[in-house]
């Protein structure tokens, strides 16, 4: 008789577990069964008889979608990440806009209209951003289906059932929708294996260059040209060290702390720009040295330092402020949202502000013209000396 009882409980457990798919279940840690056989949670939400079963311990499993239109609420870890990244507040009592079959919309209280599947896992979550990406334009239908509305989408991709997305309701804002993309086992792109050894090798040679020019190299260590090479090599050395750390971290499993990913990007961006500005100092020094053979103008090292270290600092500061104070729009770099760099490569060119893009273009213009000016001036002087019969040409 005892064996029969155990088999009966196991059979009930198997049948109960098949009430709904795993992605459409909610686990209730604390609840009580009412006299009518319903399950009442601590929040006062009732789950009808026949839509839940008791776990081996004190918790229950429920199938909210069996009793009406349902929607999945993203799991707490993802919600916390979104709250930190976008500076928003999760609110389960918020309202949501839903669309009916007659193409009319209305505002409803989320937890009153839909049955909620709490703490839903989402494999490979991708946040929908209709303000940035046209293909992400969507509506939530009254039956809990996600409807993608962009005209270029084929019919088979227009509708997504609750298993394939989850919702993060927000306080005083429209909810954020996260699509669950089934991409299988993600493979590390080949570039991370190919680039990493070259980053490390570049860092090693830059270190040797730095040691040679700054400590054991030429006798004119105090010349501006020599100091410029030292500073430019040091800046590039830090860039390649940061890139090596980023790629090695991705190869070994990714970042466990997002702040480290974001901080590495900030450091990389600053020293990358500083290396370009020090290269610009070299061009300016060459231009001032050779523009006249009778009188030269020297740049002081402290002046070059203010230019080459200072301007990148303010550009990076503006970028950090834009990244921390904005969450969407053309001025937001969105560093760390999808990778340890700008979310899109074109943002690297337009962030943080258009005037800074013009400043970068001005630096390139100055370098280009300084080189051609020096070359043309040098050739002109040589030709004049040849015409005058100077034997020392």
Image (tube, helix red, strand yellow):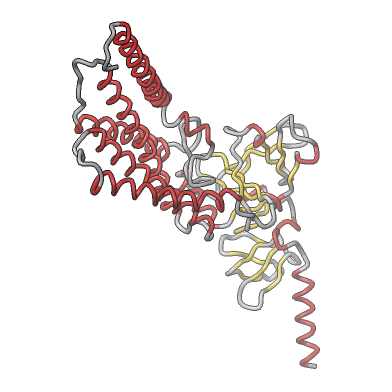
Count of marks overlaid on the render: 0
Compared to residue 29, the image places residue 7 above or below, namely below
Q: Looking at the rendering, which quadrant does residue 381 occupy?
A: top left
Q: Quadrant of the N terminus?
A: bottom right
Give left or right: position of 299 versus 357. left
Q: Quadrant of the C terminus?
A: top left
Compared to residue 274, the image places residue 381 above or below, namely above
Rendering coords of residue 145 (x, y %):
73, 45
Compared to residue 144, the image places residue 256 above or below, namely below
Q: Viewer-proximal residue, 392 or 52? A: 392
As drawn, the residue found furthest toward the top would be 388
Q: Looking at the rendering, which quadrant does residue 30 occupy?
A: bottom right
Q: Viewer-proximal residue, 255 or 92? A: 255
Rendering coords of residue 137 (x, y %):
65, 34
Rendering coords of residue 178 (x, y %):
61, 47
As drawn, the residue found furthest toward the bottom would be 1
Q: Viewer-proximal residue, 70 or 353? A: 353
Rendering coords of residue 56 (x, y %):
66, 78
Residue at (71%, 63%) from the top-left corner?
Answer: 22
Residue at (71%, 53%) from the top-left corner?
Answer: 163
Residue at (32%, 10%) from the top-left corner?
Answer: 386
Compared to residue 114, the image places residue 99 above or below, namely above
Give left or right: position of 120 versus 2. left
Q: Looking at the rendering, which quadrant does residue 29 occupy?
A: bottom right
């Amino acid at each position: 008789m005892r064996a029969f009882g155990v088999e009966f409980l196991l059979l009930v457990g198997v049948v109960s577990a098949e009430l709904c798919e795993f992605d459409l279940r909610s686990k209730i840690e604390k609840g009580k069964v009412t006299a009518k056989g319903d399950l009442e949670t601590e929040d006062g939400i009732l789950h009808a008889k026949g839509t839940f079963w008791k776990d081996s311990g004190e918790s229950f499993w429920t199938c909210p979608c069996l009793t009406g239109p349902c929607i999945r609420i993203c799991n707490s870890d993802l919600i916390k990440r979104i709250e930190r990244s976008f500076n928003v507040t999760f609110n389960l009592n918020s309202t949501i806009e839903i669309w009916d079959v007659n193409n009319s919309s209305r505002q409803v209280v989320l937890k009153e209209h839909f049955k909620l599947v709490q703490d839903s896992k989402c494999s490979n979550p991708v946040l929908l951003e209709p303000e940035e990406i046209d293909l992400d334009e969507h509506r939530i239908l009254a039956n809990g289906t996600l409807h993608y509305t962009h005209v270029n989408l084929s019919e088979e991709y227009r509708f997504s059932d609750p298993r394939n997305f989850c919702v993060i309701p927000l306080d005083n804002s429209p909810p954020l929708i996260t699509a669950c993309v089934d991409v299988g086992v993600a493979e590390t792109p080949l570039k991370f294996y190919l680039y990493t050894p070259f980053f490390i090798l570049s860092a090693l040679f830059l270190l040797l260059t730095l040691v040679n020019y700054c400590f054991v190299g030429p006798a004119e260590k105090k010349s501006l040209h020599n100091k410029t090479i030292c500073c430019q090599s040091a800046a590039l050395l830090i860039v390649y060290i940061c890139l090596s750390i980023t790629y090695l971290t991705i190869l070994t499993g990714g970042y466990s702390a997002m702040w480290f990913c974001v901080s590495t990007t900030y450091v990389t961006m600053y020293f990358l720009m500083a290396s370009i500005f020090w290269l610009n100092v070299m061009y300016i020094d060459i231009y001032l040295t050779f523009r006249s053979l009778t009188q030269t103008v020297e740049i002081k090292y402290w002046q070059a330092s203010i230019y080459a270290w200072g301007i990148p600092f303010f550009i990076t500061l503006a970028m950090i402020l834009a990244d921390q104070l904005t969450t969407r729009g053309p001025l937001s770099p969105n560093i760390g949202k999808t990778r340890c760099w700008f979310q899109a490569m074109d943002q690297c060119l337009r962030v943080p502000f258009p005037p800074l893009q013009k400043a970068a273009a001005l630096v390139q213009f100055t370098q280009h013209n300084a080189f051609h000016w020096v070359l043309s001036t040098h050739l002109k002087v040589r030709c004049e000396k040849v015409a005058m019969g100077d034997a020392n040409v």
